[in-house]
Image (cartoon, coloured by chain):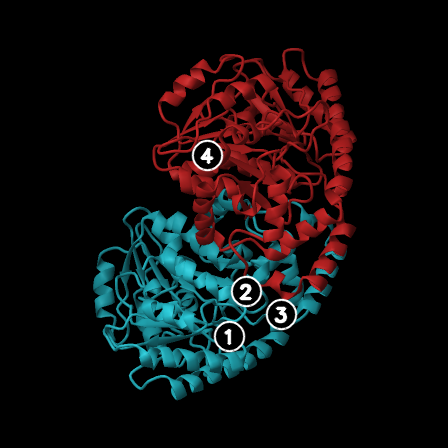
Chain colours: A red, B cyan
């Protein structure tokens, strides 16, 4: 089945009777609407017409300062000149593709990986190759071999990845970080995309590749880090960012100027005002409490109603659970049956760079309320149990 | 002098003692800040969390409806499916380049033309060719000859163009419209970019190419029309749009999805709320009265202080006056001297696709107050009078 056909199928998920695990949406009932209203009022009263005027491509200086400070590590302070504000993290990925990926360039990604990174970089002519995962390449020896053929980009979602919910282990990060070489002619640019890191429900966060490479290589670190306020404040303001060494950032700024001149100064000031009012801190436990409980609801429902031959991830954070069925089963066929039962998910083949993953699918657990999660998983379990096993 | 060097020079224009005619900024003292505050409050109170959630790539349906209705002509109603909301008009141009321009494709533009269209399409591999202007090609016979070599795009700013302030005459539009052929395999896509049309201070507007081609070719019209709320409401919300036939729009929607998923629903609702509150109507005479008077101030000052061998346009609208000096004079050299005298403008070579226009420059008349316009033009006149004529 073609992607466009799946997209058509998934349009059905807007039906109110549909239980959708297909999107990647935050829970809108937690959006701090009253605080946003007050912050908007304050920005418009106190910042004046400048927030409604054309602004600098790099973004609002005060917000860039905040991002820089939030990512500084002891002995390696970041400055605003290392931060570019983008229209959501998606635009950061898109700009990275335009600047660093030319026809035929090798881009190493996890497989499966974030679908919209693939869609952003495919038109640039990226040739995707899979980073062998920890289970088949524990000491990254195959990965090292791969890097001897020069890769233009390495793309990683280290925390609670979309689609699998899995994270890179501490050991894996150490091993990968050792592969990072400093910026230079023909060197590989590393992209660490971390939209979900703050949505951690268990355990503690390992250090990021950005920090590790920064500590080792300083201003010659080739790691770009992409972030967003979409998951910790609201997505609808479309404020994200990318940070990294100045020569790379300068090229991204020029690309952004051609792409949309700059992102809305009003939205950037609104994000900054919400941060100054402590919304990141007040929202954090609200997100994590709700999502932890919804994740647990989904994992319990899966354990109760899915057959023993189905497997799924148990993520420590993020928004997704990833289901693997026996080889030969096809989740796109299942989707049609699930939709007939009023349940939606995204078939796993979508997220793969090759023709694999037909026996997998992605479930979102952050958007639907618990009783709908239970009911949706029950129906889905029935559909799967009824299906021939390959 | 390289573009980057000019950019560095122009950074000086942020000095408070600098009189800058370099930007293309609206007058911020006219921004309806109080109305925006009230509209923002109403949107956040009444539209609910959906305005802060992820939204459809195409844009907010109600705003698309408004754009469609505003461009409908008798017998040819437009629908929302022919409208894509973009992050400013610049993004519309950028998406058009990604979708329609491949390496080596011919793109016909006026020469000089809008600088940021060139910067958006150059990385796509556009080969720019100049549309001969009316004075050298009154019946478009050279233009016709050009179109026999297939052009991928024709790009026109019909009203008060950036940089010259000139408009296409009624006759010229008739002649150009006759060159438009319906959509089909290998057909030419026409882009009509009209950010300034509503800023008319004298005369009446001729019909647009979009309307003419739409009346003739209906759904097979190959004209995309690009618009923005930046000049008639505020630029800082970054809301623009592109409208055209569905097959072209569908391709642009897919490109936008990869570029930034979608534009902020909040900003779109805010624009819609301002429209519903009548702000387009209340703002229109405020813009046009102020800008007409500033244009007149600048034209008077030019007539009083510029030498007789300098020439300039007398635009009926928009934001720019275009100055032409004798061949051999160089406006980039002049810029350095002008900056030393505390006045900034943009050298004309910037806007040209070839190595011409070194004797031209662009002046913005909408941003500086009248006494600064007079003082700036006086200083600039002195710099020019002192300069050797070629």
Name the side, left or right, on which B108 lies relative to B296. left
Co-location on one chain, circles 4 and 1: no
Name the side, left or right, on which A366 lies relative to A58. right
Place of residue A374 in the rendered image (x, y in percent of width and height, measured from the top left): 75, 26
State the residue position of label 4: A220
Name the side, left or right, on which B286 lies relative to B114. right
State the residue position of label 3: B31
Residue positioned 56% across, 58% down in the render: B238
Residue positioned 63% across, 11% down in the render: A309
Give the chain letter at badge 2: B
Crowding near the residue tagged with mark 3, few <14, some 14–19, many ≥20 C-alpha atoms within 10 Å: many
State the residue position of label 1: B366
Place of residue A238 in the rendered image (x, y in percent of width and height, measured from the top left): 60, 48
Place of residue A234 in the rendered image (x, y in percent of width and height, measured from the top left): 68, 45
Instruction: Kindly state the secondary structure of the residue where label 2 is placed.
Output: loop
Instruction: Check if mark 2's residue and mark 1's residue have beta carbons within 8 Å.
Output: no
Instruction: Kindly state the secondary structure of the residue where label 1 is placed.
Output: loop
Q: CA distance from mark 2 to mark 3?
A: 11 Å
Mark 3 or mark 1, which has the lower sequence index? Answer: 3
Along the line of sight, the residue nearer the viewer: A268 or B130: A268
Q: CA distance from mark 4 to mark 2?
A: 39 Å
State the residue position of label 2: B230
Co-location on one chain, circles 4 and 3: no
Give the chain letter at badge 4: A
Mark 2 or mark 1, which has the lower sequence index? Answer: 2
Instruction: Kindly state the secondary structure of the residue where label 4 is placed.
Output: helix
């Amino acid at each position: 089945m073609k992607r466009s056909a799946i997209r058509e199928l998934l349009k059905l998920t807007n039906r109110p009777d549909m239980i959708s695990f297909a999107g990647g949406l935050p829970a809108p009932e937690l959006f701090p609407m009253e605080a946003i209203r007050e912050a908007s009022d304050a920005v418009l009263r106190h910042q004046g017409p400048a927030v409604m005027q054309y602004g600098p491509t790099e973004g609002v200086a005060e917000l860039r300062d905040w991002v820089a400070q939030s990512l500084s590590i002891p002995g390696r302070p970041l400055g605003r000149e290392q931060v570019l504000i983008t229209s959501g993290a998606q635009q950061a990925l898109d700009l990275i593709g335009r600047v660093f990926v030319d026809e035929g360039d090798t881009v190493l990604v996890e497989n499966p990986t974030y679908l919209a990174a693939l869609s952003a970089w495919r038109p640039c002519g990226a040739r995707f190759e899979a980073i062998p995962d920890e289970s088949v390449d524990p000491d990254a020896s195959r990965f090292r071999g791969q890097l001897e053929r020069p890769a233009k980009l390495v793309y990683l979602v280290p925390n609670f990845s979309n689609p699998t919910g899995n994270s890179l282990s501490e050991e894996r990060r150490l091993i990968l970080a050792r592969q990072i070489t400093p910026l230079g002619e023909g060197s590989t640019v590393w992209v660490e995309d971390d939209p979900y890191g703050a949505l951690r429900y268990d355990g503690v966060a390992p250090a990021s590749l950005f920090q590790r490479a920064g500590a080792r290589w300083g201003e010659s670190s080739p790691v770009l880090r992409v972030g967003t306020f979409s998951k910790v404040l609201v997505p609808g303001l479309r404020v994200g960012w990318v940070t990294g060494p100045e020569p790379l950032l300068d090229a991204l700024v020029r690309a952004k100027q051609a792409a949309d001149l700059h992102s809305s100064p009003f939205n950037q000031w609104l994000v900054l005002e919400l941060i100054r009012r402590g919304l990141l801190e007040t929202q954090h436990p609200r997100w994590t409490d709700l999502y932890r409980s919804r994740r647990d609801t989904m994992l319990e429902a899966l354990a109760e109603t899915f057959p023993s031959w189905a497997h799924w991830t148990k993520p420590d954070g993020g928004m997704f659970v990833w289901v693997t069925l026996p080889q030969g089963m096809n989740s796109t066929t299942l989707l049609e049956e699930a939709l007939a039962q009023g349940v939606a998910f995204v078939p796993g083949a979508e997220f793969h760079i090759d023709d694999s993953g037909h026996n997998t699918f992605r479930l979102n657990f952050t958007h639907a309320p618990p009783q709908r999660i239970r009911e949706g998983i029950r129906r889905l379990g029935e559909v799967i149990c009824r299906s021939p096993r390959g």
